[in-house]
Image (cartoon, rainbow, N blue to C red):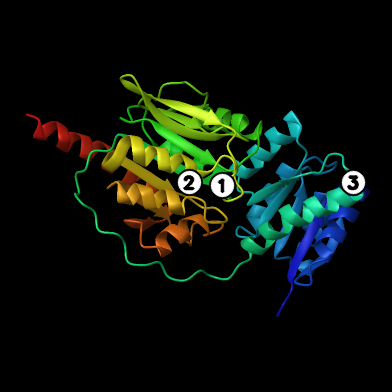
Amino acid sequence: MRRIRVLIVDDAVVARRLLTEALGSDPHVEVVAAVPNGRVALARLGELDPDVVVLDVEMPELDGLATLAELRRLRPRLPVVMFSSLTERGAATTVEALARGASDYVAKPAGGGVGAALVRVREELLPKIRALVAPAAAAPAPPRARRTEAARIDVLAIGASTGGPNALATLLPELPASFPVPIVVVQHMPPLFTRLLAERLGARSAVRVREGVSGAPLAAGCAEVAPGGRHMEVVREGGGVRIRTHEGPPENSCRPSLDVLLRSVAQVYGPHALAVVLTGMGRDGLRGCERVAEAGGQILVQDEASSVVWGMPGAVAGAGLAERVLPLEEIAREIVRRAFVGRAAAASSRR
């Protein structure tokens, strides 16, 4: 079996050694080269023929964003994992890279010594590398039958992980400012990253986008992004629905978790919820979609061909919970159609 070929690009000698040792501990992974900048990486790309590139964010000569842009031009489907510091600048550049097509990221270890850093890189980076070059998933189960074509939608809940920032940057700007229902979003990211992601998405979307704050009311045409490190739920209080965030135990090794959000969405909105599961590693969202389906809600998932990793959407499709499995570029149109048609039908029935 051919080993996964990894190219490391980082200007720091210590980082190159750390990554080489951490990845080299896996017998299924081969570090084909560890180079000091983007120019060298691009010059040797054809010779090395990597399956995955681990790319530093801040480098001399050619930084991470510029290198990523050229990698995407030369190899559009080549997985690229950003190796990022947890600083404001590093996080901002990483969010920008993810929105421009980077596949995923791993935060650089801070403190704890070399041993702890090796363990952390192995635990965080190796599973992502494996997922990014995983073989094709099994075919999805037959789509779940819809109860009614014109069911009213009162909330849109979206979940994503690996590849999600880029998918969200494609989907949310396609929703009109007049979008008639509130939007709640879980993107697997740590604190700081989610705020920067919400700001970037908000600057490019007609709908308002902000990081969710506990106690804030949901509003039509406004997307609330779950804050990193906290679960986000919706709760009915008085005459409206509000956000509640908390530091409950991680679920599916995630906090925020899509399962947590979707359980609350199913409880509060019942048959009037639309859940959308986008690209992502793992199975977060599967149990939550089961609750949405049991409550009579609607479920769409991104297809495998347009997903960076078909873990999360594939799990939902494989369980037969998805009503439609769609390419990313078609999902926004289907969301808008369901949101507006359903509400128009409901209004007509009241006349």
Residue denoted by label 2: 259
Q: Residue furthest front?
A: 249
Query: Mark 3: few, some, or many residues within 10 Å (few <14, many ≥20)?
Result: some
Q: Position of residue 158 (x, y in %)?
A: 44, 42
* Secondary structure category for the residue under label 3: loop
Residue denoted by label 1: 251
Query: Mark 2: few, some, or many residues within 10 Å (few <14, many ≥20)?
Result: many
- Which residue lies at the image location 32% right of the left edge and 40% below the top edge? 273
- Residue 38, placed above or below residue 25: above
Query: Mark 1: few, some, or many residues within 10 Å (few <14, many ≥20)?
Result: some
Label 3 – label 2 distance at C-alpha: 39 Å
- Which residue lies at the image location 18% right of the left edge and 34% below the top edge? 344
Q: Is residue 313 left or right of residue 71?
A: left
- Which residue lies at the image location 60% right of the left edge and 60% below the top edge? 77
Question: Which label belongs to residue 14?
Answer: none
Query: In the image, what residue type sits under mark 3?
Result: Ala
Query: In the image, what residue type sits under mark 2?
Result: Asp
Q: Is residue 87 left or right of residue 280?
A: right
Residue denoted by label 3: 12
| Among numbered discs 1 and 3, the one appearing first in the sequence | 3
Query: In the image, what residue type sits under mark 1?
Result: Glu
